[in-house]
Amino acid sequence: MRLCSCAMHLLVRWMRSCMRRSRCHLPRRLQEHLSYTRLIFNSVCHNSLLNCDLVTDSLFEPVFWMVDIITRWFGMVFVFLVIVLTSSVLLVAYFCLLPLALKTYSLGWLVWHLSYGHWNLVMIVFHYYKATTTSPGYPPKMKTDIAFVSVCKKCVRPKPARTHHCGICKTCILKMDHHCPWLNNCVGHFNHRYFFSFCLCMTLGCIYCSISGRNLFIDAYHALDSQTSAPLTFKDRMFHKSVIYMWVLTSTVAVALGALTLWHAVLISRGETSIERHINNKEAKRMAKRGKVYRNPFNYGTLNNWKVFFGVEKRSHWLTRVLLPSGHSPYGDGLTWDIYPIKKDMMPV
Ligand SMILES: [Zn+2]
Ligand SMILES: [Zn+2]
């Protein structure tokens, strides 16, 4: 009997110790798992530069990725569209308007239209070709002595001043302005001038077509709209429709591209790129809070900014480098930049 009670006592003690051990073990194991998961999460996500912008960027990363893919794919489609639409306007000009001008215009007007129209056409074709085929400029991949201002988080390479990363080209671009789908190329240090000259010449060409074709457009519109006059032949209907198509297209492009060109002209006058406009605005607001005034270090004064942009070093360059097609290299290497006021009176023209 005594032996039996002793055995029961031992069994109860063993069960109690087991229960206590299991009660202690479960939370500890769970705790270990939790701390291990937390350690993995922290080691993957920890970033000393973590802030609100980085979190937003990370959350929107899939959206940016989709936009990048679509833009990259549509790049060739947009270039094709520019070529097709420009060619269609040229076809209307050569096959519909030129024969009419040869019959009706005086010699003076004919010389003006032929000279201006062909100068404009050569400028558009040259600058579009150069803007699409010229590399915008990339920072060196090898180690150099050039002073860098930051490190690109995507390329993990040092970035010179005015350099920014392009998500579509997947590389850093010197003096990056923006990625242009209509060029299927980035606009940077080495092709910025070609891009702007193309926009300017295309706008001028569209304004020229829009003004000189206005009366023909009104005549064509009334001829197609009128019910009372004799029925038009197929050739006449095609002529009127072509004139209407050309006028509507060139007028629309003149307004849209004209606004873009004007905006870029303002930026060039201020010595800024599209990206720097946002950065400089932010910086100006930040410094204004401290009672200071921010000054863009790359603004050399309006006229000098234009001279630097077009590479004008003497008076004749306004003709040979601005008004005529020119393949000269831009001022500087895009890696190092002179800072105001060193360049205040750099080119006395
Ligand atoms: Zn980069
Ligand atoms: Zn790009």
Image (spheres, helix red, strand yellow):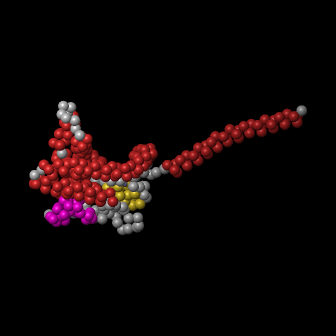
Q: Which corner quadrant holds the N terminus?
A: top right
| Segment colored magenta | 309-331
Quarter of the image containing the C terminus? bottom left
Going by the picture, which residue comes out furthest to the top? 228
Q: Judge whether 4 appears above or below 303 on screen.
A: above
Quadrant assignment, res 6: top right
Instruction: Decide if residue 54 is in sight here.
Output: no
Q: Position of residue 274 (x, y in %)?
A: 29, 51
Position of 127 with respect to 28 (left or right) is left
Foreground residue among 319 and 88: 88
Q: Is residue 35 magenta?
A: no
Q: Residue at x 41, y 50 (%)?
A: 73
Going 36% across and 68% down the picture, which residue do you hit? 145
Q: Quadrant of ligand 2?
A: bottom left
Residue found at x 12% / y 50%: 105
For the residue pair 294 and 139, the one nearer the viewer reads as 139
Tell which of 118 and 193 is nearer to you.
Answer: 118
Report x, y in % for residue 81.
33, 49
Q: Residue furthest right?
A: 1
Instruction: Please give the count of numbered marks on the rendered protein.
Output: 0
Residue 309 in percent (x, y) is at 23, 59
Question: Looking at the image, can residue 14 be seen?
Answer: yes
